[in-house]
Amino acid sequence: MSYQIEQYRQNYRDQVIPRHYSGVLHLTFTLTSLSATAIFLFSRVQQPGWLDLLLIPLMLLLGELAVYGIHKFPLHRPMRLVSRFTFKIHSLQHHRFFTDACVTWRDTRDFHIMLFPPFAIIGYILVGAPLLYGIFWALMGPNAGWIGAGMGAVYFLLYELVHFCSHLPEDHWVMRIGWMRYQREFHRLHHDPRYMASHNFGVVYPLWDFVFKSAVKPAPASLSRLTTSKVR
Ligand SMILES: [Zn+2]
Ligand SMILES: [Zn+2]
């Protein structure tokens, strides 16, 4: 790791992460609150029709498309009003803390720069989910409302999990899963300063980068390195 990155990481740990911050608590809150929200919303569904069920894959596609757009624009381009929460946290902090040469975390306090802040999750529960419920309820009825809002929570959870795993060490047991191996390498390339503002914006899967021709494909050699590293 270069001296500059090491220095940046140390400054971030000393000056930005609150002294009493707990990464384990942050991760637990993220996983349990999003899972509980999804379970509650799905529990309201009664005898859904096939059109309602079609919302499940559709929301996975739309969720990733929305993330593609958010990642490409507000997170990687300074925009008035939101820059403090988007460009600054993502481009100036997350991308300086993790580069393609150094993509893994050191200890659980580093979760601070990997996971969404809790207010984003509370925002989804209080604003995002009711909004999605209202939109799909108005378009297709109550079952669609519950499924649409529930799938929003599932997509959010998937995003957090896959992005978290993309910053795990390359010899972690999770890399036994082919999808994770590919997505970790795909995301590692996005952390290359040459590509970060223009390529590999997909986080859960790479489809939209291929559609919009912004994909840098992982080299087979780097994927097989993940396959053959001694998995823990
Ligand atoms: Zn990242
Ligand atoms: Zn990025």
Image (cartoon, helix red, strand yellow):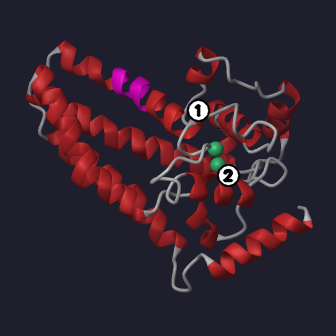
Name of the residue lying farthest toward the right:
2
To which quarter of the image does residue 189 belong? top right
Residue hosting label 1: 202
Q: Is residue 162 left or right of residue 14?
A: left
Helix, strand or loop at mark 2: loop
| 160 sits to left or right of 225 | left
Q: Is residue 22 magenta?
A: no
How many marks are shown on the rendered structure? 2
Q: Residue at x 47, y 30 (%)?
A: 64
What is the magenta range?
A: 57-63
| Residue 120 sits above or below residue 205 on the image | below
Location of the N terminus (image quadrant): bottom right
| Amino acid under disc 2 | His
- Please tell me which of labels 1 and 2 falls first in the chain: 2
The x and y percentages for residue 40 are: 19, 47
Q: Which residue is mark 2?
A: 167
Tell me the quarter of the picture where residue 135 sits: top left
Instruction: Tell me which secondary structure the magenta stretch mostly adopts.
Output: helix
- The x and y percentages for residue 56 are 31, 25
Q: Which of the four quarters of the rendered structure image does ligand 2 lie in?
A: top right
Q: Within 10 angstroms of label 1, few (less than 14), some, or many (20 or more) residues?
A: many
Q: Amino acid at mark 1?
A: Gly
Q: Quadrant of residue 4?
A: bottom right
Q: Is residue 65 above or below residue 127?
A: above
Q: Name the residue at the bottom extreme.
A: 19
Q: Is residue 196 above or below residue 1?
A: above
